[in-house]
Amino acid sequence: MFHWFDKLSVQVKLLLCFAIIVVVGITAIALNLINIDAINQSAQDIAANNTATRNLSDAQISFLFQELAAKDFLLTGDDSYIDEADSSSAAVGGFLDAASENAPASSQAQFDELRELQQTYLDAYNTMVDQVKADTDLTAMFISIDKADSAGIDFDNRVDELVVANKDAVDAELQNANAIATRAVWISIITMALFTGLGAIIFLVARQLVEPIRAITTAVTQLETGKFEPSSLDKVAKRRDQLGKLAELFQKMAREVASREAALKAQVEELKIQIDVAKQSQQVSEITDSDFFVELQNKSKALKRGKQEGGSAPAK
């Protein structure tokens, strides 16, 4: 499956691994930065929704104080309760504005409805106050009270709906943040796995680089001592990279050196033989040319002549 990778040179393999590490690292960093931004945005949305929920709760409580102050005014006729009601009414408006600023844009229509209900209640409340001060008949007063109570009930219901919606939004944001965090963890795990795998590949590539160099170094040492066998580099010479070419050239050089050494030894042996023959001829010549050897030859010839003459005398 990865035969194409084996055909690459060592330098290309290392560069390829380095490039993959850089690309994976940059991609992982970019994805994690995106996840961090998404988590920060989720955290901001959660904080905004929580703030809006608190403001809605405060508006609901202030609205309740407003209703209580209005009822106390109806029971006692004390104008101080009108001031309390006005103060609570202003607080309701402030809390609604604060909640609206922190709430998502999709819920702004509901806040507008709450403001209308608050205004409806205020209109009914002001009418009721005027009726009490003017001693209006009870029928008209009860109509104003019913309008105020109805607006108050609708206000509470709408606030409850918004609080529930905000809580659901918070839950959704929490789930989204958890999903993003899980994705970030998986990205980190996958990145570490890729780095581990690439580290293993780099180790194997480095090993492929070190072992042939070690073999060639050993071959050089053996060549110096005359113990080199070209077949010891066959495995390295089969490689298709620069090391393989180097091993092949080294084998060729070693064989040529061995061949020249053999030829030189043969020439030396032949020369030795020629020198030995020459020496022997010289030694023989020296012996035969000596006076002693000449004298021996003469004596030998004289003896031979004496024998010949002795053998021919009876015939006469």
Image (cartoon, helix red, strand yellow):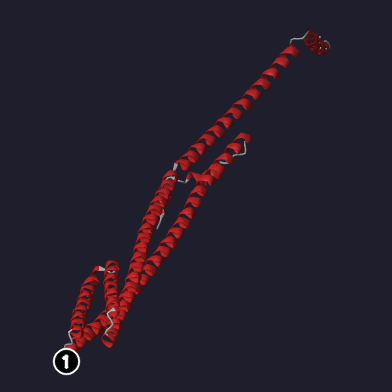
Tell me what residue is drawn at x 35 percent, y 66 percent. Answer: 42
Around disc 1, counting alpha carbons within 10 Å, would you say few (fewer than 14), some (14 to 19), or many (20 or more)?
few
Q: Which residue is mark 1?
A: 139
Quick check: can you spot residue 172? no
> In screen coordinates, is 193 left or right of 137?
right
Residue 14 in the image: x percent, y percent?
44, 47
Residue at (69%, 17%) from the top-left corner? 281
Q: Quadrant of the N terminus?
A: bottom left
**Residue shown at 16%/92% (left/top)?**
139
Question: Is 288 left or right of 217, judged from the image as shown?
Answer: right
Q: Quadrant of residue 289?
A: top right
User: Residue 142's quadrant in the figure?
Assistant: bottom left
Residue 112 visible in the shown view? yes
Q: Secondary structure at mark 1?
A: helix
In the foreground, 101 or 125 = 125
Q: Amino acid at mark 1?
A: Thr
Residue shown at 56% from the left, 43% from the top? 214
Q: Nearer the viewer, residue 17 or 193?
A: 193
Q: Is residue 24 left or right of residue 97?
A: right
- Residue 288 in percent (x, y) is at 74, 12
Viewer-proximal residue, 188 or 245? 188
Q: The C terminus appears in which quarter of the rendering?
A: top right
Q: Position of residue 64 (x, y in %)?
A: 31, 81
Q: Position of residue 265 (x, y in %)?
A: 61, 29
